[in-house]
Image: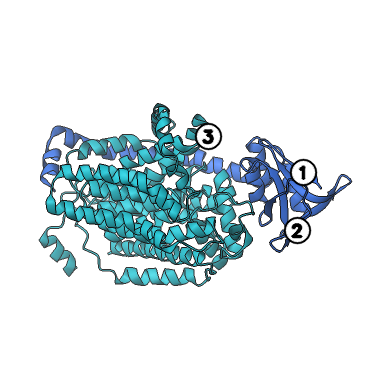
Amino acid sequence: MSTVDQQRSATPTGARVLRWLPWLILAHLLWGAARLPGKALGRRVDEIERYRRDGAEHWFLDRGGYGGADVITWIRDNTPERCVLLWDGQRLGAMEFAAALLAPRLFVRAEPDGDERTEYAGLPIATGSRDGAQGRIVLHAASDRLTLELR
Amino acid sequence: MTQRWIMRGFDAALLACALLAVLGSALLAGGATVPDWLLPTTLLGGTALALARRRPPAPPLDPTTAPPRRWAIVLLALLALATFALMVYGSLATPSRQWDGAVAWDLKARFLTDAPTLQQPFFDDRGVLHHSRDYPLLQPLLVALVERTCGGGRVVLAASWLLACAAVFLAALRRGAPLLRAAMLALAFGTTPTLVTSSSGGVDSGYADFLLATWMTVAGAGIAARDRLWITLGVTLMVLTKPEGLPYAWALLAAAWLTASRAVLLPTAIGLVIGAATLLPLQHRLLHPDQPTLTWTVALAALAPSVLALGSDTVVRRIGGATLRRGLGVGALLLVVLVLPWMLERTGNAKGSLARYLLLGPELFARLDRLPAFALALGEYSLLHGSFALTLPLLALAWWQRRGRRDADGSLGLWLALLLPLWLVTFLASDIELSRHLRSRLPRLLIHGCGAAWIYVLTAWPRRDLTSADAVAQRDD
């Protein structure tokens, strides 16, 4: 023990602090432990159930107030995993989830004046048909929703 | 005896992580594929090194301390087991259920699981959408390699909780704390509400914030336990985990220098050189896959802070004088502010996650009117929401108890204090609406320092140093 420590522990304040600390640590531990059953376990189980029931796209987009979860589902059901999807609009927001939820599909910005590419980096550009329209799939990312267009 | 084996297991895990982080990042930066055998090899290598390591004997227990109550130890062990099981469940039940975990970290891990190389369009093609492109890849790589080897890669997240708690526990024991106090400190930290609830930045959220906090806890534990290896490995790993790791390592270097703590300065400098020399080429490759790495500038950027700190510390020690040290400290800060943006540009990271903050320069000062909002939010999120429970009051009490004490632990306190201006810069540099940014980011930044803060709390008790008789007795044992 250094001289300062010996002096500190010998003072009434120093000794009092060292007496108080274990009780405060115990209080912190009880606080944390008390939250484990409800906030940690209960909430986690509930979230996991909802995630599994609703699917990842509804979990993220609906909860974040973004529209377009059905678009994600449609793309996943109607395109191969190994393909490139064209997109335009805002990179941050809903589009972040699109890239994550549709992996390993890759996203490349659509050419502004029409896109004639059929493949990118050795992978096919995704095409599809929906509601009578047919063409390359282009995902539009607005600040609050994702929409789909076939060009 | 048991303590010695727990300590060896902890050393082995740390060494294995550091070997994997450095070799894996270097292979990725070089355009190679990380082989699946790297994981078992680094585990074996880490274990062998830990077994070969000679460590100083631990201080004996205080003979005046009452023997631990067995029921209390059993209760704490059960609570630790239950919390760990909860973290494993939360990690493995689904992919990440929180924003950044899903859109950044899981996505990188997914592509690295399919093929652990950067030679694929997701990493190598700038035209492909890729969020946070230049983030360090330690967490995704760990998840990917475990996933490829045995499945359940996200168990890495829960394992990091165990490692962080072990760091607090072992640091307390190494300082001569009684078993019950060490176990209470470790578990009190481990059950801090924000870490174990399923919110952004929590252990199983998939964010890399807690992994970064783990390495900061390890570095802090190294300071408290006078273990240079822990400091070196903690610093290296924090640099390779998140972009914030590099400025945090610089801050620790500065804290060790300002407190004239050579025992902390040297291992921090070594860890920083290893970490930065591995990270900077990787970041350059991620940002500019088609350009060759600028070798000499990368080497200079990795070496310069450590060499300058060690060299100037030697000079100041010879000449002496706290005033000279303080003056040089201010000069070094100015030098960093002036030179670092240029340096980052020369290393090819001018548009990277770190340079974005540094290149703003004078604009940051014009935004200092955000300081009161930052200070208020700091108080609010660390104290009022209950997420950190009593961490802040405990930290304040520990500081009160330690005031005036001049030892290596002082560099830990100063390091924690230096995190504050670094966090402030995050909010000065950003164009995101301030209150929204503070709400989403500040709680996660506080998580980074949480473990190191708990290490600081345990330094309130003076370290029980070995007497020569103790040392002989332990060696004979």
- Report the amino acid beneath label 2: Pro
Q: Chain of mark 3?
A: B
Q: Which numbered circle lies on residue A148?
A: 1
Q: Chain of mark 1?
A: A
Q: Are marks 2 and 1 on the same chain?
A: yes
Closer to the eye: label 2 or 3: 3
Residue located beneath label 2 in the image: A80
Compared with B15, B397 (above or below) is above
Q: Are marks 2 and 3 on the same chain?
A: no
- Measured in 3D between alpha carbons, the distance from the residue under mark 1 to the one under mark 3, in whole angstroms, is 28 Å
Residue B7 in sight: yes
Q: Residue at x 55, y 46 (%)?
A: B100
| Secondary structure of the residue carrying numbered label 2 | loop
Residue B72 in sight: no
Q: Residue furthest right?
A: A132
Residue located beneath label 3 in the image: B432
Percent of width and height locating residue B103: 59, 48
Quadrant in the picture for the C terminus of chain B: bottom left
Compared with B376, A25 (above or below) is below
- Report the amino acid beneath label 1: Leu
Color of chain A here?
A: blue
